[in-house]
Image (cartoon, grey):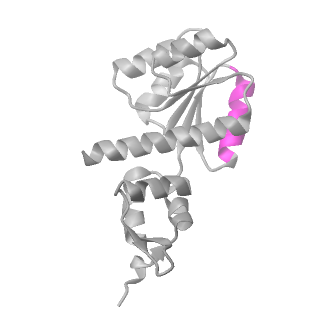
Amino acid sequence: MSHSNDEFLTVNEAAQILRVSATTVRNWAADGKLEEQRTAGGHRRFRASEVQRLARTVMPNAKPAVLVIDDDPSIRYVLREAFSAVGFDVAEAESGLLGLDSLDQSPPSLVLLDIMMPGIDGFQVMKYLSQFGVKVPVLAMSALGPRVEERSRELGADAFIAKPFDIRELVVTSRRLIEQHAAAAAAAARS
């Protein structure tokens, strides 16, 4: 007697609900984060109720939220359009100060952070985040090259993309950072 909420899902169905890649679902199963069943044919199946429970811990909000902190309106526009098109909620701030205000209100799944801005620049934003223990993945962006990338990583950026960037690469990198951060947060919650 099976309950309707306990039907079994494939790896891909579980991945869609969890908003992660099929590879991440398989890794989570291997790590014991998600209990798997095997069909007679050896295919992985997951209880729908288990997947929903994990979804609530990994992604309490349905859409991943991205905060774009960049003083260039054209870059904010491109990022807003690209990320909205693939299912993200996008918030924008045209300065480091407004970005910090926005972070205080509700931490996003990811911050896309321009480094060179008037007033409070990206470096100062990252210093603030580490000083106040704000745990949010940061993808730093700059046209200024390797020295800026090195400094960004020293200050805690999780990734760096040089401007001008390839928007597809930026979206893929962003999703990966959000997944890694969610997985690390879930692991920390278990230990």
- Expressed as whole percent of the image width and height from the top left, the position of residue 12 reads 56, 64
User: Which residue is rendered at x = 71% and y = 39% of the image?
Assistant: 168
Taking 24 as reference, is 169 left or right?
Answer: right
Q: Which residues are magenta?
A: 72-84
Quadrant where the image shows the N terminus: bottom left
Q: 25 or 128, which is in the foreground?
A: 25
User: Which residue is rendered at x = 36% and y = 42% of the image?
Assistant: 185
Is the residue 99 above or below the residue 83 in the image? above
- Expressed as whole percent of the image width and height from the top left, the position of residue 139 reads 56, 28
Q: Is residue 53 magenta?
A: no
User: Which residue is rendered at x = 39% and y = 31% of the image?
Assistant: 135
- Expressed as whole percent of the image width and height from the top left, the position of residue 107 reads 44, 35
Q: 40 or 91, which is in the foreground?
A: 40
Is the residue 151 above or below the residue 8 in the image? above
Q: Is residue 80 magenta?
A: yes
User: Which residue is rendered at x = 41% and y = 59% of the image?
Assistant: 29
- Expressed as whole percent of the image width and height from the top left, the position of residue 53 reads 36, 62
Taking 3 as reference, is 148 left or right?
Answer: right
Q: 120 or 12, which is in the foreground?
A: 12
Most common SS among magenta residues? helix
Quadrant where the image shows the C terminus: top left
Is the residue 100 above or below the residue 137 in the image? above
Is residue 133 at least partly visible in the picture?
A: yes
